[in-house]
Image (tube, helix red, strand yellow):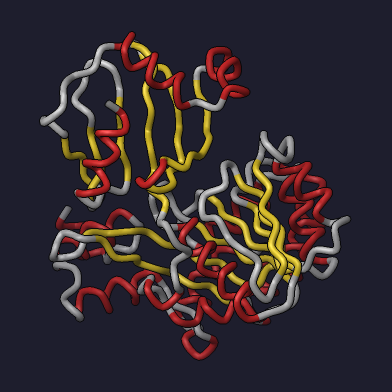
Amino acid sequence: MISQVLQKAIEQGASDIIISPGNFPAIKKSGEIVYLEDFWKVSGESLKNEIFDIIPEKLKEEFVAEMEIDFSIQANELGRFRVNGFKQKSGYGLVFRVIADSIPEFDSLNIPEVIKSFSNRKAGLVLITGGVWSGKSTTLAALINEINKNYKKHIITIEDPIEFVHSSNKSLIEQREVGNSTHSFENGLKYALRQASDVIMVGEMRDLETFRLALRAAETGNLVFATLHTSGAARTISRIIDMFPGDEKSYIRTQVAESLLWVVWQDLIKKQDGSRVAATEVMIKNKAIENMIRENQLHQINWAIETGKADGMIPMKRYLTKLLESEEITQDIFDVHMRRYGLATDEQKDEV
């Protein structure tokens, strides 16, 4: 049943497939749930048997003990999927994320051209931020692909799980998967520093020690790419600094001020034709922003982005306005996202 559902989902252009006991299989298409009512509501026991048939043998005990698991699979001719297994009140379920068969070319993503230039720096920290299903992994894969095609670097990725599969081109690229080829992001990052790395990609910055190691890697000559579940450049920097104990904050502000290069915040929003488009904010560190971080004046960063057009910066409000003016999104969608992101004018807020 699972393979049949995956086949149907691919045919319908789904981004995600959700199979849980007692429900029709469902897909996400353009960010919305669509039930596949050609199938049946699967029972908990039969679904459990199918799930344990596809989970890697070494993860089965962990899944039973932890009641959730992440892994990736290549499903024959259907393609590659990132999979999350979980347990709910009626039994076990799975969510599949469709991964593109090929590494996306940067120019196909409809994101600001300035982001492409991030691939040509030698050292520093680049953060790609946003919520779940905001396209962070795709943007990262495109950036790594740009380096792989154009520069002679040693690239190490640390992912959980591996999504896009890269092959060495001009660069030598090695992909490590948490739980399979390294025990943790922290371990993978620590040992990457001893492996003559030039570029390190960290799938997700989850804990304090990973942040410390990422900053150290950026300071010692690596170009480090990482993702964070945050919205807005200023909030991203605040979150990093707030993670550290009070007696470390001053030192960490100095480290971030020196090592951080760019912060990208992106989200996928619905277009007029029902498909989705990336809405993007770009912060490029200049001397003013470096001083704001060092001096703990983070509340001024949004102003610096608004006035930083000459440096290539793009505030989210300007990007949404561009999408509205090009008629890719409607006025209603524009207003909803302005309010959602806290960017609404006083007049718009009064209307709400």
* Figure quadrant of residue 4: top left
Task: Tell me the quadrant of the picture where the N terminus can be found.
Answer: top left
190 lies left or right of 341: right
In the image shown, does 53 or 241 lie closer to the viewer? 53
Q: Residue at x 67, y 55 (%)?
A: 157
Quarter of the image where one finds residue 113: bottom left
On screen, residue 340 above or below 180:
below
Which residue is nearer to you in this view: 291 or 228? 228
Residue at the front extreme?
A: 77
Q: Is residue 246 above or below residue 196?
A: above
User: Horizontally, is 24 left or right of 311 in the view?
Assistant: left
The residue sitting at 35% across, 57% down in the picture is 341
**Residue closer to the observer: 315 or 106:** 106
Residue 294 visible from this viewpoint: no
Q: Residue furthest bottom?
A: 310
Towards the viewer: 272 or 102: 102
Residue 189 can be seen, yes or no: yes
Picture mark count: 0
Q: Position of residue 95 (x, y in %)?
A: 37, 33
Residue 198 lies, with reference to residue 42, above or below; the image says below
Q: Quadrant of residue 90?
A: top left
Q: Is residue 193 left or right of residue 225?
A: right
* Residue at x 16%, y 22% (from the top left corner): 40
Residue 324 appears at what percent x and percent y?
Answer: 20, 74
User: In the figure, is residue 316 to the left or right of 222?
Assistant: left
Q: Residue at x 51, y 49 (%)?
A: 229
Residue 321 in picture, x, y percent from top left: 26, 75
Q: Residue furthest right?
A: 194
Residue 174 % position (x, y): 70, 57
